[in-house]
Structures are given as structure tokens and as C-alpha cells.
Amino acid sequence: MRLFGRVVLICLAVIGGLTLALFAIGVTAVSSHHAKPLPKQMTLALDLGAGLQETRPESPFAKLEGGGYTVREVVETLDRASRDPHVNTLVASLSGEHLGMAQAQELRDAVAAFRKSGKRTVVYSSGMGEGAAATADYYLASAFEEIWLQPSGDLGITGFMAESPFLKDLFDKLGVQAQFGARWEYKSAIEMFTQKKFSKENRDSLTQLLNAWSDQAVAGIAEGRGLTPDQVRRAIDNAPMLAEDALKAKLVDKLAYWDEMEKSLTQKGAEIVDLEDYAAQAKPEPNAVKVALIYGVGEVVEHDPDNSPFGGGNVFAADRVTQAFRDAVKDPEVKAILFRIDSPGGSYTAADAVWREVGQARAAGKPVVVSMGNLAASGGYFAAMPADRIIAQPGTITGSIGVFSGKFVLSGLWDKLGVGWDEVHLGQNAPMSSSNQPFSPQAWERLNKMLDAIYADFTGKAMQARHIAPEQMDKLARGRIWPGSLAQKAGLVDELGGYATAMADIRTLAKLPSQMPLRLITFPKPRPALEVLMEMLDDGKVPQEVAVSLSAGRELHQAATLLRPLTRAVSAPKGALQMPPVEVK
């Protein structure tokens, strides 16, 4: 019977291993399949219905979920297509997910560059909703030569707005106390917990941002549509408007359904090809100089909490980013580093670790250029500071040089619920992180000293990196956010632009000819699917969802787990009670 059990176990292991191997081969095949040859005449289709991503998931398995295009993919492909005689038209669809202001500006620049080649550009929408997102979408649409709108659609370019919930009254009713300290008055992330409405400083900061976005959108729409700024502002005040009204206001060129527009694009024998399919067949330019592309996207954290091979990697994980910088520095073929940041901030220590590696890369002779997406605030800006050049779009949310920390005290809530707590502690400040009691005077003093030290470190490094005097830095910092246009004037960033501007700066810093082709290589380098799966088997980390996705059932999961060496030592869990995490957002 024992022999029979071993045979069954071995068979399950073999079946599981073969299944995983076949799955890995399938993943590899999907990601490297050969598409059919491109037609001789093409209309390039850019469907923005799924929005834009800064980066695709790192896992070879998460990539199977698909998703929208990346900003870099669109910019690079439009540049290539502008020089391709087989591409005669660009058509974009703007219905569905909305774009951030900086993303809209990045695509506007790419579309404008494509139009300079003399090729036709068309954008189609079934309707552009309402509010700030629709205004940013139409701002992008105005860069196209032709705007087509579905007859039943509307144009909701009602301008920009910022709003936030405030929970203080609710917390008071629940017996929850928000105890937070911030540096300084513009560090507004905690206000939704501690205030009943926007503070004057927060309102002023948001008003400045919205004014900048509005001015940028009005100027761009006026230029693109051949209108005056006053005409555009009146159109915004009259929105949302029906399709017929938008046509009369010269905000759109034609009212039609998609199939009608499609006929106009294919009349001369051109075939519509999706941008992603077109990009998949791009061949690297010969003799291109290798540039490392490192992403810092999402909340800044020490480690990715979802480190599963099936995870999406949607955080700015310091351990991953710092290793990517070290790998790029060691690679002799890498001549420079492009650091793309789109982050609201997060952990101070994590941001500081990345700050160190950016400086180390420069010291090793590898120029570093930072390109900012929709936002690079607090910890996101902290990590960018040591770079040779910092580039932002006019609408990029920038700065927020400041810090906050604290906790929610739930003792009042427990009293209302009839829940009692007791504790024993050693050390005067041992209960500091407990949510069951407020900070003691001594603990509150320690927290504020920590905030003072972090703020001094942040501003000190900013002054040194950006060559800004202390009195001027005091005006720029204090937790205040800036649109990229004003951040550039203040010296927090060097230039306005996106990927194209960054690539030009890399050529200058690396002392390369202005037309030298560059090849962006993502760091850290993606691992092959089979290698990841074999490591999972070796470590016994095949999760249940893998077994289900492979249709192998619970038995496969259990069998794979049994393959672990029974004598492997189990490491003791690490961790300790610690301070509340310091958030730089």
C-alpha cells in the first residue's frame, strides 16, 4: 500500500510538473507569437477605451490579463509610424476610461509630432462624459486634425474640480480619534480625518493646480481648434452640450457612427491595424545605444506586498527599484538610465533608499534622467531629486515636500461596542503604536521630533540637489503641491516634456549624437515563465489559484506542496512592534 501511495504521489508530481511546464511554454508562446505580415497601407488604430498604463505587470503570468497600452509604447510607436511610408492615418478612440492631465499632454505631444509628417489624424468618441476627466480627454482630442462624435453623444467639457470627503464628524460619532502630525500646513493628506472642510492652505494649493490645468487646456484647445481662449471658456461654461451644439460651436468636425468613419479610413484600400499589433513587429534599430528604463510607479513601499509570481507589481517597491539601479550600473552596455516616476509617495525610508541608489548611479558615471507622469509627489519627488535632469509635464502634480505620521485611536469605539482591552508593557513608549490608547505626552514628543528630522532631511537634500536657498525652499516646501509648469519656474524640475524630451537629454548627458538611436531596456529584466514556475515548485509556493487556473484541482496543489524536502528548516518569523509607518504622500 505504501508503494502504491508513492507511485500515486510521483505520478501527481510528474503530471503537475508537466502541466506547469506546458503552461509556461504557453505563456512564452503567447508573448512571442509571430503575427501575420503587416499590410502595405495602414490606418493605425489607438483604442484608449481601457485607458493608459505607465507600465505593464512584471510577472509573465499577470501579463496574460492584458490591459491598455503603456504611455511609452504609444509614444515610441507613433514616432516610428510617423516615418513609416506604409502608415497613412492615425485614428484614436476616446470612449471609456479617462486620462490624467499629464498623460493627455504626453499623448498630445506625440500626436502633434505625428501630424508634422503630413499624415491624417482622426479621433472618434461616442461621448465624453462630464467633468475634469472629460475636459482632459477633449484637450487631447483637440490635437487631432479631425474630431468625430457619435450623433447621440455629448461633450461634457465642464472644466476641472477637486473634492474630498471629510470624516471627522463620523469619527466623532464612532468614537474614533485621528492623531496625526504633519510638516507643515500644506501637507493635507490627513485633513480628511482631522478636519470638516478644506483648510485655507489646501484650498489655495488645489485652486492653483486647477487654474494651471484650466489655462493649459484652454490654450491647447484654442490652438487646436482655431478658436480664441474666450470662445473655449464660453464653451466650457455652456457644457455639457449635445452633439449638434458641439458641431455648431466648432468643437467637433463630423457627427457619425463608427462604421461610417471606418469607411472613410479604408476607402483607398488601407487596412486598420491596432497599435499594439503594429508595435509587436518593430525591429530594434541597428547600433542603438542601450538605456536602462526603471519604473517607480505606485505607492512607495519597502517591499511589494504581493510578491506572488501572479501579482501585478502595482507599487513602487524600493527593494526592486534599488536592485534595478545596481544591475543597470553593473551592465557595461548601459550608457544611461531613464527613471520614470508616477507616484503619490509613501514610505520615507523606502524613498530614501532609492534616493541613495540614484546618487550612486550618477557617481558610477551613469547619467540619470527622471521623467514624471501624472504625479511625482512627496516620496516620489524625494526619489527623483539626485538625478541629472528632472522632466515633468506642465500638468504633473509635483513636490509636496513634507511628511506626516500618526494613528487612529479606537478606544472610544471599543467603549461604544462594549469591548474591553488590557495590556502589559515594558518601556515608556512601548504602547506608542497601539490603536487602543492615545499618544502619551512623551510619545507625542518623540513623534514630532521624528517628523522634524525627516522634514529637515527632505528639505536639506532638496536644497542641495536643486541648488535652492533655504528661504526659497521654505516657500516651495511645507507640503505644498505644484503643477509642473510652476515647479519648473521654481527650479524643482528642469524641463517640461515627456519621453521625447528625456531621450534628447540622455543623448546630451551621454555625449551621443543628437540622432543616435536609443534602445530602452526595462530593468529589472523579466524572468522567463518556466524559470518562475520551477522555482515555485522547488519552494512549494504553488498557490491554489495556480492549481485552479491550470485545471489541475486541489490535488495538484497538495501534491506540489508535498514535494518540499521534509527536512528543510523553517525560519523563525521576523517582526516586532514598531512605530506607525511614516507616510510621505
Image: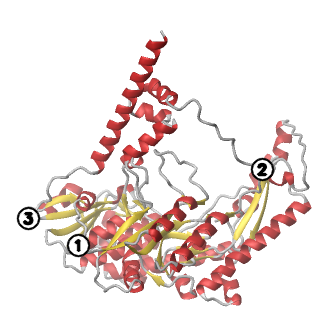
Q: Nearer the viewer, mark 2 or mark 3?
A: 2
Looking at the rendered structure, the kind of residue marked 2 is Leu
Tell me which residue sits at (56%, 78%) in the image: 386
Element type at mark 1: loop
Looking at the rendered structure, the kind of residue marked 1 is Pro
Provide residue 91's location: percent of width, then percent of height: 24, 65
Element type at mark 2: loop
Measure the C-alpha gap from mark 1 to mark 3: 33 Å
On screen, residue 89 versus residue 198, left or right, reads left
Residue 84 drawn above or below residue 167:
below
Residue 286 tag number: 1
Tell me which residue sits at (45%, 62%) in the image: 130
Q: Earlier in the sequence, mark 2 or mark 3?
A: 3
Report the residue marked by disc 3.
Answer: 268
Tell me which residue sits at (80%, 49%) in the image: 435
Tell me which residue sits at (59%, 85%) in the image: 466
Report the residue marked by disc 2.
Answer: 577
